[in-house]
Image (spheres, grey):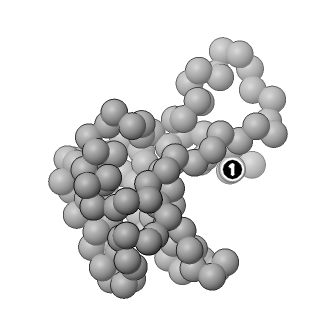
């Protein structure tokens, strides 16, 4: 079971995969890290997910130094970043932009 979180500048999507099936997809808008963690924890509570055991995968416009990551890690132990997709050829001018920012949404939309 995994909970994926695709983060943008002021919104994010949560996708919960349980037993290999899509169990939840929802999107939220946020202004502060506190808004972000509120929606994440509220969703986790409603789904009755154990925050100590869920694999939480971050994607999109977020990195380890961001406030959203720091507050998330206080409440959820198994936080990781999604791996970069390497089966696409990307122009050198875009490689730096796509290292961890919005690659999931952009590359998986095709």
Q: Is residue 95 above or below residue 77?
A: above
**Residue at disc 1, secondary structure:** loop
Q: Position of residue 98 (x, y in %)?
A: 59, 30
Residue 73 appears in the figure: yes
Q: Is residue 100 above or below residue 24?
A: above
State the residue in front, 79 or 68.
79
Using residue 87 as the reference point, say whether residue 53 is left or right of it: left
Q: Position of residue 69 (x, y in %)?
A: 33, 45
Provide the residue designation for mark 1: 108
Using residue 67 as the reference point, say whether residue 82 is left or right of it: right
Q: Position of residue 39 (x, y in %)?
A: 28, 65
Residue at the (42%, 44%) spot, across then down: 8
Image quadrant assignment for residue 28: bottom left
Image quadrant assignment for residue 26: bottom left
Residue at the (36%, 70%) spot, across then down: 51
Residue at the (27%, 73%) spot, across then down: 42
State the residue in front, 48 or 52.
52
Residue at the (22%, 63%) spot, across then down: 38
Q: Position of residue 65 (x, y in %)?
A: 34, 33
Number of marks in the image?
1
Residue 106 appears in the figure: no
State the residue in front, 72 or 39.
72
Q: Is residue 25 above or below residue 72?
A: below
């Amino acid at each position: 079971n995994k909970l994926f979180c695709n983060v943008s500048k002021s919104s994010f999507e949560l996708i919960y995969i349980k037993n290999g099936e899509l169990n939840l997809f929802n999107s939220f808008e946020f202004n502060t890290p506190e808004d972000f963690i509120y929606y994440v924890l509220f969703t986790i509570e409603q789904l009755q997910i154990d925050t100590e055991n869920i694999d939480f995968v971050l994607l999109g416009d977020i990195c380890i130094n961001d406030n959203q990551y720091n507050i998330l890690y206080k409440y959820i132990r198994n936080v990781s970043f999604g791996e970069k997709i390497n089966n696409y050829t990307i122009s050198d001018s875009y490689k730096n932009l796509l290292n961890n920012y919005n690659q999931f949404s952009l590359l998986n939309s095709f």
